[in-house]
Image: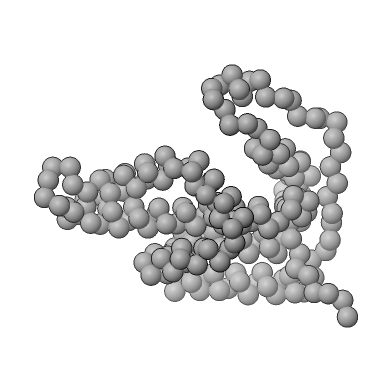
Amino acid sequence: MPKLTIHPTTCLIVWLLFLVVVQFMSGTTLVVTLLLLPALGTYVLQRGSRLIWRARWLLISMLAIFSWGIPGDPLWNGAFAPTHEGLREGLTHFGRLLLVLVAVAAFLEAMPLPELLAAMHTLLGPLRRLGLDPDRGVVRLMLVLRYVEALPRPRDWRTLVDAPATNLGEAVEVDHRPLRWPDYFVALALALAAAFYVFR
């Protein structure tokens, strides 16, 4: 009996659907989802922590903008007090962005680069009818991911200028496997579930 395996494209679609659903999470659902993050494992949390640390100023700025930028009841009596409504909205967006960053870490940790390239190639395949070349998109994605992973943390702009050039003579092989009925079933079922959650 053949082993049932899910196509990398299906995994990519599931991940994208999760990112969409995250944008509509709030309140108890958001808090419970955040509390379940340790179940993803140590490696995912470590990688997610690095992403969160790099985005710390964005997170802090977003929280401050919402807390002091949305009118409402002041949190305390004072001239520079944030509002209850603003703080609640800021914490909601703060939690959503945390989920997105950890989801990115989990996706990169779970899916090897060859499978990610194969998934993107299949997902972008229909764009050929519009005159776009998915092969170029896959190659550019590979170069960007490799550049981000290999690039040292810059101390100033000269580090970026002195970064080594990419090897332009490298050949890229992308595994092409057709989608099967379980892939369509999983993608359709989760798309319907995501639509029900968003538009309920």
Pick out the residue farthest to the front: 42
Query: Is residue 140 in view from this perspective?
Result: no
Left or right, 194 with reference to 76: right
Residue, x 50% and y 67% (percent of image)? 36
- Give the residue displayed 65% in from the left and 72% down from the top: 188
**Residue drawn where x is 34% and y is 52% of the image:** 90
- Where residue 43 appears, x then y in whole percent? 62, 55
Considering only vertical position in the picture, is 7 above or below 91?
below
Total residue callouts: 0
Residue at the far bottom in the pictured view: 1
Towards the viewer: 51 or 73: 51
Residue at image position (56%, 21%) is 157
Query: Residue 100, image x and y in percent?
Result: 52, 54
Residue closest to the far left: 77
Image position of 91 (left or right of 144): left
Image quarter of residue 79: top left
- Location of the C terminus by quadrant is bottom left
